[in-house]
């Protein structure tokens, strides 16, 4: 049979796949079949009938009546704003649990309808455990006011993107540095110009070997110390 996998060492069921509707079936030796991957209950029922037809074509005789029922529906939604998960778990400790070291999302369990919501700080929500599609909508309708109550008012800025890091109006690292007065002892002294030329042509006196009188005299260590001391005084 095409589009079928069976690796008993890894998994004890036959994996069958359909392209239309896009679905995957897990067929066990007991005769039970689990259909997953569809986008609606109608597509799940249609995929079940197609899988039963495939089994009949290869030699198996399925039941005339297929006991089809929905076990789990998963939905996702983005509320569009960040949420303070710590505030939610402190205000609703009976229904929620939050362990960021183990899982980054908050687990919120509703009693009616019996669904579980995985709430993330970015505002993404995963709803699972529903038996009907209406339960997804009802669960989100009940939890949405709680998420709206603990909505993050401001998001922490990313350093280096024009944010104000200095207290006061018009703050900012660059603005604060520009506005700060320059102290006199912090000024860089102006050093005398560096003498450039052919080192081999400079002698002890004002005259070099084969040079002329205009050849500049090399400053000795004592003269350089006096020059630097005069520039460094404040």
Image (cartoon, rainbow, N blue to C red):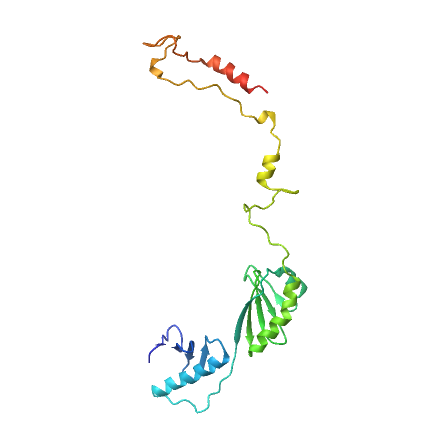
Q: In the rendered view of the protein, which quadrant contains the C terminus? A: top right
In the displayed structure, 159 sits above or below 98; it is above
| Left/right of residue 119 with respect to residue 60 in the rendered view | right
Q: Is residue 31 visible?
A: no
Residue 73 drawn at (x, y percent): 52, 75
- Residue drawn at the location 59% of the way across and 39% of the way down: 175
In the displayed structure, 148 sits above or below 203; it is below
- Residue drawn at the location 34% of the way across and 13% of the way down: 201
Counting the numbered discs, the total is 0
| Left/right of residue 9 with respect to residue 232 in the rendered view | left
Q: In the rendered view of the protein, which quadrant contains the N terminus? A: bottom left
Residue 17 drawn at (x, y percent): 39, 77
In the displayed structure, 80 sits above or below 170; it is below
Residue 131 drawn at (x, y percent): 55, 79
Q: Residue furthest right?
A: 91
Residue 36 drawn at (x, y percent): 46, 76
Q: Is residue 186 visible?
A: yes
Q: Quadrant of residue 127?
A: bottom right
Nearer-the-camera pick, 206 or 65: 206
In the displayed structure, 4 sits above or below 207; it is below
Q: Quadrant of residue 47?
A: bottom left
Q: Residue furthest bottom?
A: 64
């Amino acid at each position: 049979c095409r589009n079928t996998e069976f690796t008993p060492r890894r998994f004890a069921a036959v994996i069958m796949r359909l392209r239309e509707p896009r679905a995957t079936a897990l067929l066990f030796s007991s005769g039970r079949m689990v259909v997953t991957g569809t986008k609606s209950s109608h597509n799940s029922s249609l995929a079940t009938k197609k899988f039963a037809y495939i089994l009949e074509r290869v030699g198996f005789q399925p039941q005339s009546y297929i006991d089809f029922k929905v076990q789990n529906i998963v939905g996702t939604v983005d509320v569009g704003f960040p949420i303070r998960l710590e505030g939610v778990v402190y205000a609703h400790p009976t229904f929620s649990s939050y362990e960021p070291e183990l899982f980054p999302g908050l687990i919120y369990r509703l009693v009616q309808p019996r669904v579980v919501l995985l709430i993330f700080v970015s505002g993404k929500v995963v709803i699972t455990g529903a038996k009907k599609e209406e339960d997804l909508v009802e669960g989100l309708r009940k939890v949405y006011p709680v998420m709206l109550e603990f909505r993050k008012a401001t998001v922490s800025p990313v350093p280096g993107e024009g944010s104000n890091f200095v207290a006061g109006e018009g703050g900012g690292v660059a603005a604060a540095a520009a506005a700060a007065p320059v102290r006199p002892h912090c000024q860089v002294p102006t050093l005398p110009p560096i003498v450039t030329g052919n080192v081999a042509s400079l002698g002890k006196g004002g005259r070099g070997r084969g040079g002329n009188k205009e050849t500049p005299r090399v400053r000795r260590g004592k003269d350089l110390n006096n020059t630097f001391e005069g520039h460094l005084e404040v």
